[in-house]
Image (cartoon, grey):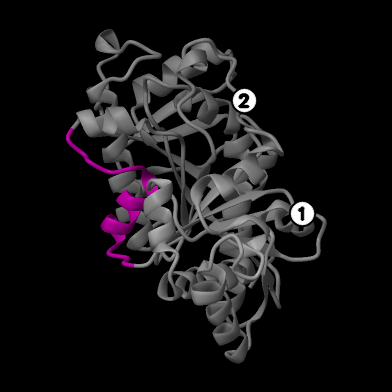
Amino acid sequence: MSEEYKPLLAITMGDAAGSGPEIVAKTLADPEVRAICRPVVIGDAATMQAALEITGVSGEVRAIEKLAAASFQDGIIEVIDLHNIQLDRLTRGRVDPMAGKAAYEYIKLATDMTLAGECDAMVTSAINKGALNKAGYHYDGHTQLLAELCGASNVAMMLVSGKLRVSHVTTHVSLLRAIEQVRPERILTVLRLTDEAVRQMGVAEPRLAVAGLNPHSGEGGLFGDEEIKYITPTIEEVRRQGMNVTGPLPPDSVFLRTYEGQFDAAVAMYHDQGHIAVKMLGITHGVNVTLGLPIIRTSVDHGTNFGKAGKGTADPTSLILAIKLAGVMCRHRRRFSCPS
């Protein structure tokens, strides 16, 4: 197997009323991106053409009906065109059910193509949950939607920013509900998914850290007993199974220790605990990875940025990093599955 393998990536355009099409246009003009993958956009060709004009990026949009028609030439953005945006009806910067419905259709097709093995991975631009729900698709975001499309019952969210990788036991639920969900079965699932993902990112023997739920990890039960009842016994169990796991560690220091290289990934107990740590490193420098799917999926770690939609000023860094990480994961998957 050649180290020069360039994975074929299905890149969803995202919400047409947001900055997604513009960051896709900017990203695919980056020579480093073209050097590491074969990209095809799942979206609306007319919207992508408008994005080129808004951003001033040089290039050409080429609408195709099937993946087999793609040539992957530099300077050409090839779009599997679903013809599902009426530009004369679109108001950028506002929640629009038309854009929400179209975004769902991009995700559905990209998922189907990747599940079928036509693409090596999918990379998603931002969607708007309000637009998605107004269009009749009642999901709390990409993770729940992708789990359903893939038939995956146990998924988790990981955020990656440089040297910091953080997975989450719970995400889009209230804090009260999150505490109720911090239980051994779920913690065990996320630890296993995290270990597997970090290996696929190139770490042969992952060192994982687990954050406590309570201040000071409960301080021996003084500030809460979830660590004693649920988290510590689960860590002991996975250690017996051979995983290298440390914790529960105080949440106020575990992420810095992970960033400094003491661990290869940290497991957060709830949404903000992990998200704040990663986003402190830069709002456009994170990548969202869905763990537990039968496919590789990475994504931008930000929203549709309605405030910059149509202005050409949105930062494409997160999408560029998502594509690079998808490439790394694809190459390591091939290394594990293909004889050399």
> Is residue 151 rendered magenta in the image?
yes
Kindly identify the residue that appears in the image at 30 percent across and 61 percent down.
Answer: 150
Instruction: Indicate the amino acid at tag 2.
Output: Asp
Q: Quadrant of the N terminus?
A: bottom right
Question: Quick one: SS at disc 2?
Answer: loop
Q: Quadrant of the C terminus?
A: bottom right
Nearer to us: label 1 or label 2: 1
The image shows residue 250 at horizontal and vertical percentages of 69, 60
Judge the density around disc 2: few (<14), some (14-19), many (≥20) Cα neighbours within 10 Å: some
Instruction: Indicate the amino acid at tag 1.
Output: Tyr
In the depicted structure, whether residue 5 falls above or below residue 86 = below
Residue 316 in sight from this viewpoint: yes
Going from the N terminus, do you reach mark 1 or mark 2 first? 1
Residue furthest front as drawn: 222
The image shows residue 333 at horizontal and vertical percentages of 56, 70
User: Which residue is denoted by mark 2 in the rendering?
Assistant: 315
User: Which residue is denoted by mark 1 in the rendering?
Assistant: 259
Kindly identify the residue that appears in the image at 27 percent across and 57 percent down.
Answer: 148
Judge the density around disc 1: few (<14), some (14-19), many (≥20) Cα neighbours within 10 Å: many
In the depicted structure, whether residue 76 falls above or below residue 2 = above
What residue range appears in magenta? 136-153
- The dot on residue 69 is none
Kindly identify the residue that appears in the image at 43 percent across and 70 percent down.
Answer: 183
Question: Quick one: SS at disc 1?
Answer: helix
Q: CA distance from mark 1 to mark 2?
A: 24 Å
In the depicted structure, whether residue 18 falls above or below residue 199 = above
